[in-house]
Image (cartoon, helix red, strand yellow):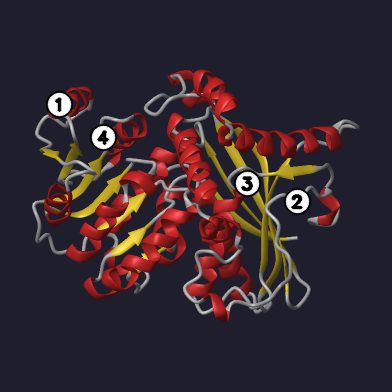
């Protein structure tokens, strides 16, 4: 990469909970000589973060505010890559997307917000494509394991000459970690939006809501985000029951966008869903129903004033997160199963140590930033509003494997 700007990577929102974790990861793992900046609204808070980071005493501090578009434009022009943890993105993120798209600056975030992704595509995909910017949403546990898992499945199936992917399921086999206040705040914002806007409800519910060309998408019938299936419905010999996966409503749309951006390279009959394991006991069907009902109850509770007041008193607030021990001892395992158009069966696994939404996500976002900054020749030839697989692809797979992630594929 030719270094034509003052900085290589800027962490915007570095004084927030996940922003601090991402800055710490970069401080410990970025190559020597990487020029990193910390950005946010409060110089004092950013200085405290900088003081806590090893070897970061010379990192510059940039003052930028989501309510000040000029400050975001200056931020985007100062660096090759911006990573942002400032959410909910639908409230605070679109002006930074604009600034990066116009400046030709690569961008990565942790958004799991479908409506924000749709707005970003509609307003700035063409702008970013013209400037050469890669705008990459969902670079954390939403949706890198899903997107890269299907990416490596497709690569292996293609290499083996076994046709296209058809029915494909991601099964969350293990998921241990805390819940972030930022995630809860994004859910509140989604509930508020869809209550007032029927069109937004249709977008959020549509299986191809992030498609670059909705009219060109295949008609594969109903594709529900709330399926409860047996393991044997996913792959022969797989036991147990499943429940809906809370992040599936975002991840599935990101994966389908990757397929569409690649001109349906995964296959025109590619059907994709995500579920989580609830075990093999006699009570597993009860657990599955409870998880499904609980997700519905949470969204309904956030939509109803009195229960929302009570939930706000007990749920994590923005800026809060789990303890260091919880972050360290967390982990996740996601297994993907597919049948190809020739009838062959494959499975992929994405697994990592560390709280999925915090420790592991800091690794994923940090390595996404470093790949965008330094792996230019390895990156796909693409620009615009992209996905992790279509913007970074193999370069990110290689980096995450080197960082301790398991990303593997086998024929079953």
* Label 2 vs 3, first from the N-terminus: 2
* Badge 3 density bin: few <14, some 14–19, many ≥20, Cα 10 Å: many
* Label 1 vs 4, first from the N-terminus: 4
Identify the residue at horizontal 59%, vertical 32% (top origin): 304
Instruction: Please give the label number shown on residue 47.
Output: 1
* Label 1 vs 2, first from the N-terminus: 1
Q: CA distance from mark 4 to mark 2?
A: 37 Å
In this rendering, the answer to whether 218 lies above or below 371 is below
* Badge 1 density bin: few <14, some 14–19, many ≥20, Cα 10 Å: some
Residue at mark 3:
334
* Badge 2 density bin: few <14, some 14–19, many ≥20, Cα 10 Å: some
Instruction: Please give the label number shown on residue 14.
Output: 4
* Label 1 vs 3, first from the N-terminus: 1
* Label 4 vs 3, first from the N-terminus: 4
* Badge 4 density bin: few <14, some 14–19, many ≥20, Cα 10 Å: many
Identify the residue at horizontal 49%, vertical 42% (top origin): 192
Query: At which x and y percent is residue 132?
Result: 25, 71
Residue at mark 2:
227
Count of all numbered marks drawn on residues in the image: 4
Q: Is residue 245 visible?
A: yes
Q: Secondary structure at mark 3?
A: strand
In this rendering, the answer to whether 128 lies above or below 324 is below
Judged by depth in the image, the label closer to the viewer, 4 or 2, is 2
Of residue 33 and residue 198, the one placed in the foreground of this image is: 198
Q: Secondary structure at mark 4?
A: loop
Q: CA distance from mark 1 to mark 4?
A: 10 Å
Identify the residue at horizontal 31%, vertical 66% (top origin): 124
Judged by depth in the image, the label closer to the viewer, 1 or 2, is 2
**351 horizontally vs 394: left or right:** right
**407 horizontally vs 296: left or right:** left
Query: At which x and y percent is residue 212?
Result: 47, 73
């Amino acid at each position: 990469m030719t270094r034509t700007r003052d900085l290589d990577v800027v962490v915007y929102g570095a004084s927030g909970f996940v922003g601090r974790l991402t800055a710490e990861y970069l401080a410990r793992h970025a190559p020597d000589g990487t020029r990193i900046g910390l950005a946010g609204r409060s110089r004092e808070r950013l200085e405290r973060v900088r003081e806590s980071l090893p070897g970061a005493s010379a990192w510059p501090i940039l003052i930028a505010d989501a309510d000040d578009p000029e400050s975001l434009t200056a931020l985007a022009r100062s660096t090759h890559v911006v990573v942002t943890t400032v959410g909910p993105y639908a409230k605070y993120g679109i002006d930074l997307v604009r600034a990066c798209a116009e400046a030709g600056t690569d961008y990565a975030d942790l958004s799991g917000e479908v409506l924000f992704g749709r707005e970003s595509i509609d307003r700035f995909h063409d702008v970013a494509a013209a400037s050469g910017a890669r705008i990459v949403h969902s670079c954390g546990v939403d949706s890198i394991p899903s997107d890269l898992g299907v990416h490596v499945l497709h690569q292996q199936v293609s290499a083996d000459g076994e046709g296209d992917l058809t029915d494909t399921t991601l099964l969350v086999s293990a998921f241990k970690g805390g819940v972030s206040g930022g995630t809860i705040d994004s859910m509140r914002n989604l509930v508020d939006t869809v209550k007032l806007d029927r069109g937004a409800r249709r977008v959020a519910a549509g299986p191809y809501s992030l498609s670059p060309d909705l009219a060109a998408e295949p008609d594969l019938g109903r594709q529900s985000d709330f399926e409860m299936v047996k393991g044997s419905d996913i792959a022969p010999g797989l036991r147990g029951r499943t429940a809906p996966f809370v992040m599936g409503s975002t991840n599935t749309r990101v994966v389908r966008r990757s397929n569409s951006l690649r001109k349906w390279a995964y296959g025109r009959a590619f059907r994709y869903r995500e579920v989580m394991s609830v075990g093999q006991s006699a009570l597993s069907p009860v657990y599955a129903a409870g998880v499904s009902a609980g997700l519905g109850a949470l969204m309904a509770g956030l939509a109803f004033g009195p229960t929302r007041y009570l939930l706000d008193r007990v749920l994590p607030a923005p800026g809060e997160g789990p303890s260091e021990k919880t972050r360290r001892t967390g982990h996740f395992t996601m297994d993907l199963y597919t049948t190809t158009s020739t009838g062959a069966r494959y499975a992929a696994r994405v697994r990592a140590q560390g709280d999925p939404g915090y420790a592991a996500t800091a690794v994923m976002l940090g390595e996404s930033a470093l790949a965008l900054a330094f792996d230019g020749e390895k990156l796909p030839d693409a620009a615009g509003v992209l996905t992790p697989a279509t913007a970074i692809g193999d370069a990110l797979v290689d980096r995450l494997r080197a960082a301790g992630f398991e990303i593997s594929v086998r024929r079953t």
